[in-house]
Amino acid sequence: MSKKRKVDWFSIANELHLKYGGKIEVVPKVPVTRLDAFSIWYTPGVAGPCREIFEKGKDLSFEYTLRWNYALVISDGTRVLGLGNIGPEAGMPVMEGKALLFKYLGGVDAIPLVVNERDPDKFIYIVKALEPSFGAINLEDIESPKCFYILEKLNEILEIPIWHDDQQGTALVTLAGLINALKIVGKKLREVRIALIGIGAANTATYKYLKVAGADPKKIIVVDSKGILYQHREDMEVLKKTNPWKYRIAMETNPEGRVGGIREALKDADVVIAASRPGPGIIKKEWIKDMATDPIVFAEANPIPEIWPWEAKEAGARVVATGRSDFPNQINNSLGFPAVFRGILTVRSRKMTDSMFIAAAEALVKYAEQRGIHEEYIIPTMEEAEAYVVEAIAVAEKAMEEGVARRKISRTELEEEIRELIMRPRKYMKIALEKELIRVESRYFEN
């Protein structure tokens, strides 16, 4: 579809979602050439692998079933996109879209599941109970601070990787883009002053991984809806009980006790990473002028960034990134989760560790750098399938290195398998379109 004309995406999406009745379906992957094939795929033959798993260990379920490539996308619908708490039913189109992205970009079979349960401990119970069916879990669109608690507890009790894309996915792509942006302006992560605007799921995780990557918390200033966080702000005792994650950030950052709001946080900052609320005007043009030389501006709110990219550029920003595909340097979660899951599922990983996260970010950094980074290209785009391959390989290798992989294979085998799995959905799509198994609305989808 052309990006040169203004498009009413909402109306088109409404029409086509009704027409297609959903975005994914289940199709066979084994041959059925005659009915007695079900004596193999179902009863009586299926009792064979059932006995093997029961008698020799539950990990064999990764070998005998689709579990090795099966991810759960689960949500309670309390923080859906920019729509807020719209409930599980209204959140289902997003979860289904996520499953489509998993398959098309990463070759991962994902099932969308929304649950009518807002109690975090009951939600955790549900996910734990579902664990035997899946190889990895993707938490999606869960309100904060509840999402932090759920992720931490599930990471403790699950024997498969757990990932919250609104946290780790955003942070992964943000970190990768920032590392390359800093190369362009000739600055080092450990030395720069960073302003984080908004401290919900995305920026809480971004803060964590900035530290893991080497940023100095003492050079970070964070702004929430009440202003700059600092140790002696009047609501600290309340935050300590209601949002200990934000409280810890307040204790670690802004040692000079700077007060005020976004404008004061941006003064002399080298980098601003905003993941707050849709703009424009959340960050004003004149505030960018108060930043350090060659400032870096990540304005990630959707559908409209906190400041328009051209305004940030006019105010002196050297590198600007947003969450939108129609501007350069899109900070897009879809560059992260399909490849990360491809890597962890391929080697049957038990955990998703910080080291694997950093390996994924570094793979994106190196891929873009090899392609030639500049002010308008600091991160790969979704069209670059090879970026997903190298990212998935990096995650899988780190899982094997750290001893959390159930399966260990050579680099050659790993690359061949991952490449085939990532390219396979594209082959299927080509066949489905040619054979009209999927019909195309030509007025919406141009060649």
Image (spheres, rainbow, N blue to C red):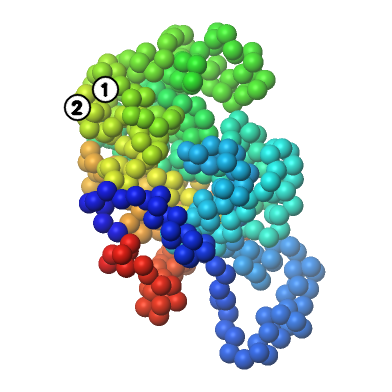
**Residue 199: percent from left, percent from top:** 50, 27
- Please report whichever mark, 1 or 2, sits nearer to the chain's N-terminal start: 1
Q: Amino acid at mark 1?
A: Lys
Residue 359 position, x and y percent, is 45, 46
Name which residue lies at 29% across and 18% down.
287
Residue in the picture at 38% in, 74% down: 433
The amino acid marked with disc number 2 is: Glu
Q: Quadrant of residue 146?
A: top right
- Whether residue 190 is visible: yes
Q: Is residue 317 above or below residue 73?
A: above
Q: Is residue 26 above or below residue 250?
A: below
182 or 103: nearer the viewer: 103
Q: Find numbered disc 2 in the image and state the secondary structure of the residue it sits on.
A: helix
Q: Which mark, by number, is residue 398?
A: none
| Marks 1 and 2 in Cβ contact (< 8 Å) | yes
Q: CA distance from mark 1 to mark 2?
A: 8 Å
Read off the residue under disc 2: 314
Q: Residue 254, image x and y in percent?
A: 46, 14
Give coordinates of residue 16: x percent, y percent: 43, 61
**Residue at image mark 1:** 285
